[in-house]
Amino acid sequence: MTDDLDARARELDRTHVFHSWLAQANLDLPVVAGGSGSVVWDHAGHRMLDFSSQLVNVNIGHQHPAVVAAIQEQAGRLATIGPATAHLARGEAAARILGKAPEGFAKVFFTNGGADAIENAIRMARLHTARDTVLSTYRSYHGNTGAAIVATGDWRRMPNQYARGHVHFFGPYLYRSEFWATTPEEEGARALRHLERMIQSEGPETIAAVLLESVPGTAGILIPPPGYLAGVRALCDRYGIVLILDEVMAGFGRTGRWFAFEGHDVVPDLITFAKGVNSGYVPVGGVIISAAIAATFDERVFPGGLTYSGHPLAAASIVAAIDAMESEGIVDHAAAIGESDIGPGLRALAERHDVIGEVRGEGVFWALEFVTDRQTREPVPAAFIGRLKGELVARGLLPFVAENRVHVVPPCVVTADEVGQAMEIYEDALTAVAAG
Ligand code: PLP
């Protein structure tokens, strides 16, 4: 019977479901029927260690009872309500989020996810500065929207025709430096000089915002060198540019801090969030807005909105998730397990496998970068990663892979025992791939 359910799930998926970011013809996706903490299982009870946190969002782990209960309770009381209402859970969620932000932040605008958080942060920066251009890095991911408001026919289209004005630059990435740098200090200083030259060349008076992931995630978990983010802040101040830090993937515990930018001596003007804020139990994201930018819209209409902005189920789940992460010390746990278990485990793996070119990360946010040769640092071909992924899944580990990398990104609640099991699986899978 349970096997039937797995087969049925697979068959319905293959027949009717159109999937994100994939060619549809030859998919064979794992069936997941349930989960708890860092483990998921299918209908037949086959367990898998979730070292992807799905799309790096299940920070609190699967099925945290307090978050599930909060959603159930809220659903019983009021399952939906429009955004133009004062709703207690929405206000509590905003207050909880602002409680984690640095001083000087005043308001939270809720969205349905990360991409629309970015859209709205850019919109705010453009209206606040009366400038147009947005600078962001080549190595980044900020989401998958853009055309809907421009396609819109009514007045809301006019102030939002922003499918223009995006300029890209290189951020720091010492392992594959664009700047011939050999130390983190050199990489940071040269990346800042490059950014300043970009700003000057584009015309500082035209630039509304610099948009950066505090730690670029999908692009490779690229922790900025010391001083880089503070240097970007100084450039933004010098030229009157809004600094937007995208914390959608890196925020809410992933790095072992509530926000990844903490410890980098930087305070942005706008912070985007999603994923870890409620671990995706209900889709939600948003923008945390500084007092100065919030004031821009005190008397002026903000030309943006969503039917589900501050949805009660999402709001209730945020309150419960932040409270549980706080009371259970989950963010501190993520920092500690990264230092004591994940980092040392991955470095030991690299000592045994030359194909690992670099290990980098912090908290529960780590990347293994695979190369054919440690001298040339040539990335392994896609087929290598495909085979490695197959070996990992076959041994009961759900991995996150991107280009020539495996990202080791379990929930923040992962235990030392689970990390130990995962390290054995990475070891065995790499040995199997090497054996050919
Ligand atoms: N920003 C960052 C840094 C992300 O990693 C992502 C998604 O992976 C997004 C934005 C987009 O978020 P969503 O998929 O919720 O729209």
Image (tube, grey):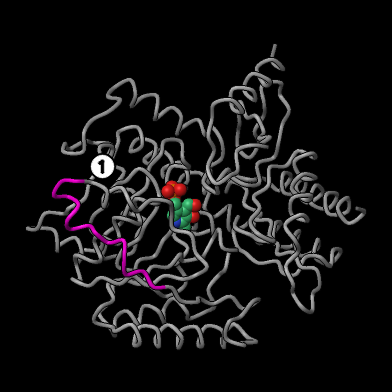
Q: Nearer the viewer, residue 104 or 55?
A: 55
Asked if residue 165 lies in the magenta stretch, the reply is yes
- Give the image location of residue 381, x and y in percent: 75, 61
* Residue under the point 80% across and 63% down: 348
Q: Which residue is mark 1?
A: 306
Q: Nearer the viewer, residue 402 or 158?
A: 158
* Residue under the point 52% across and 79% down: 226
* Residue 153 relative to residue 66: left or right: left
Q: Secondary structure at mark 1?
A: loop
- Give the image location of residue 257, x and y in percent: 49, 59
* Residue 419 relative to residue 96: left or right: right
Q: Classify the position of the N terminus by image quarter.
A: top right
- Give the image location of residue 321, x and y in percent: 43, 41
- Give the image location of residue 95, x and y in percent: 28, 48
Residue 251 visible? The answer is: no
Magenta segment range? 153-167
Q: Nearer the viewer, residue 411 or 246?
A: 246
Asked if residue 277 lies in the magenta stretch, the reply is no
Instruction: Name the kind of residue labelled 1 in the image.
Output: Leu
* Residue under the point 36% across and 69% down: 166
* Residue under the point 43% across and 73% down: 168
